[in-house]
Structures are given as structure tokens and as C-alpha cells.
């Protein structure tokens, strides 16, 4: 998946030579904290596993470092295409429940140590049109197609079980910015949608600061990812907080 993403990035860089455009690339990192994470697997009628919390029913849930990369291509003045890659994973240990049914297995707190892992890797392509482009304000809106590569696994000794999900999710995309001074820009940017079986939100509230090099900007803020789905395979809703720090370079 990452290989295909990099190929697309290379194609966009090459296309800049033929079409007058502005390209910027942003690398973001920081600390991710799992606020809540509720899971049930299986989730079929007549065959349900236990509903449990990865954050509350395991004694250890450590914050994790994360990284994501965004490539933004603005062309024909107001049209914007953006590609994003955002891998993410959390590890948990120390089951606090007496027993836990997850998939075909039952895990006991009296046995060997029980561990769990939550992976939520996302890749998305977004198109937005910049409706407002004034001296101070920028507002663009459009749609994103998110590729979700998710995995939840529980293991104890020789027992292990996992559920995976590779799917496509359409989202509404928006980007609002306000230039409050020559170098400081406030931003509210994200993708979100609520559907019949679930919801998804990935939103950043922050600011950028132009460094000495006019092409280089520092970005800092608070990001939130929240949502999940209630389907026959699995029930999973999660909230993740991010302390985000990024660096953007424009061509």
C-alpha cells in the first residue's frame, strides 16, 4: 500500500513540470493518546463476542508516537488535490477481566499475560475547490476517498485471534484558514462523515508559522480521530487525541 502511495506522489511531482501549480508536502509527527476504544468480535446476531474496552479493560495503554505525510497539489488557481498516508498502532497488556471471548477464543486473566494490538492505517485521496480566496481567508471543500487498513488482535500464550478490515470510505473534506499576521496562519482542516452503520472524523485545529525560508512552515496543533462501525463482523468505536507537530515545504 505504501509503495503505491509513493508512486502516485512521484507522478504528481512530475506533472508539475507540465502544468503551472503549487505543491507542498507536510510531514507530521507527535504523540497519540487513545481516549476510548470499544470492541466486540464477532458481532453477528446469535454469535457475539464480549463487548470490552481496550483502554479500560487492559491495565497498560501507552501513548504512542505517530507519523503522517500529506502532499497537496493546487492547480488552475482554486483546485486542490491532496494525498495522505497515516499509519497508526497501539499496544495493550494486562487483561483486567476474568475472561474475554474474542472471536473463537476465550482468554482468562488467570492464565499467561494477555496482550492486544490495535492498528488503524489510513490512506486517502482528497479533492477540494477553494470557494473563498481573500487576503485573510481561505476556504476549500470537497470530498475524500479513504482506504482503511485496520486490524485488532488479542493473544495469550499459544492462543491468538485477529480481525482485519480493508475498506473504502467516502468522506466530506474541508480546509479553513485565517491569516492573522504576516507569518501566522490559523487552520481548521479535516475529513468527516456520519453514515447508517458508523461515523468517521479526522480533524486538525492548529496554526502554521512561516520560518526564515519563505517556502518552509512550522505547523502545530491538536488533532482528533473519532469514529467506527457497528457491522456483523465487528463492533469498534475509538477516540484518539494527537499532539501534532509538522513541517511543510512548498515548491
Image: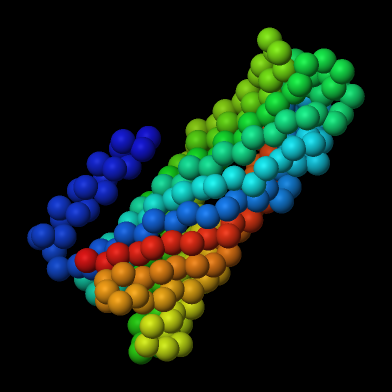
Tally of numbered discs: 0
Classify the position of the C terminus by image quarter: bottom left
Residue at image position (80%, 29%) is 95
Image coordinates for residue 196, horizontal then vertical, percent: 66, 48
Q: Measured from the top left, where is residue 34 in percent x and y?
A: 67, 48
Q: Residue 90: image x %, image y %? A: 62, 39
- Quarter of the image for residue 158 reads top right
> From the viewer's perspective, is residue 95 above or below residue 77?
above
For the view shown, which residue lies furthest in the left direction? 18
Nearest the viewer among 55 and 230 is 55
Residue located 20% across and 48% down the image: 11
* The N terminus, quarter of image: top left
Q: Residue at x 48, y 74 (%)?
A: 207
Q: Is residue 120 above or below residue 182?
A: above
Which x, y percent locates residue 48?
A: 79, 25
Q: Residue furthest top?
A: 158
The part of the image, by quadrant, that contains residue 222 is bottom right
Whether residue 196 is situated above or below residue 100 in the rendered picture: below
Is residue 162 rendered to the left or right of residue 80? Answer: right
Can the viewer see residue 20 in this picture? yes
Is residue 105 left or right of 30 when viewed as pictured? right
Q: Residue furthest right?
A: 98
Let me know if residue 82 appears in the view.
no
Q: Residue at x 16, y 60 (%)?
A: 16
Amino acid at each position: 500500500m505504501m509503495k503505491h502511495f509513493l508512486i502516485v506522489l512521484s507522478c504528481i511531482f512530475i506533472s508539475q513540470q507540465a502544468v503551472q501549480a503549487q505543491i507542498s508536502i507536510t510531514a507530521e509527527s507527535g504523540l497519540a493518546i487513545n481516549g476510548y476504544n470499544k470492541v466486540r468480535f464477532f458481532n453477528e446476531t446469535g454469535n457475539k463476542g464480549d463487548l470490552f474496552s481496550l483502554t479500560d479493560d487492559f491495565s497498560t495503554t501507552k501513548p504512542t508516537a505517530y507519523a503522517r505525510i500529506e502532499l497537496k497539489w493546487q492547480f488552475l488557481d482554486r483546485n486542490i488535490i491532496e494525498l495522505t498516508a497515516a499509519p497508526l498502532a497501539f499496544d495493550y497488556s494486562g487483561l483486567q477481566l476474568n475472561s474475554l471471548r474474542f472471536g473463537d477464543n476465550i482468554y482468562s486473566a488467570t492464565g499467561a499475560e494477555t496482550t492486544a494490538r490495535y492498528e488503524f492505517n489510513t490512506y486517502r485521496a482528497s479533492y477540494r475547490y477553494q470557494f473563498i480566496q481573500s487576503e485573510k481567508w481561505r476556504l476549500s471543500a470537497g470530498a475524500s476517498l479513504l482506504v482503511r487498513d485496520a486490524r485488532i488482535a488479542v493473544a495469550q500464550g499459544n492462543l491468538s485471534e485477529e480481525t482485519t478490515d480493508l475498506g473504502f470510505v467516502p468522506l466530506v473534506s474541508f480546509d479553513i484558514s485565517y491569516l492573522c499576521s504576516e507569518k501566522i496562519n490559523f487552520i481548521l482542516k479535516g475529513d468527516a462523515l456520519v453514515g447508517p452503520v458508523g461515523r468517521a472524523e479526522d480533524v486538525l485545529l492548529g496554526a502554521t508559522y512561516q520560518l526564515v525560508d519563505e517556502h518552509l512552515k512550522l505547523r502545530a496543533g491538536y488533532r482528533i480521530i473519532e469514529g467506527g462501525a457497528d457491522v456483523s463482523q465487528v463492533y469498534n468505536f475509538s477516540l484518539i487525541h494527537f499532539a501534532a507537530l509538522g513541517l511543510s515545504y512548498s515548491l
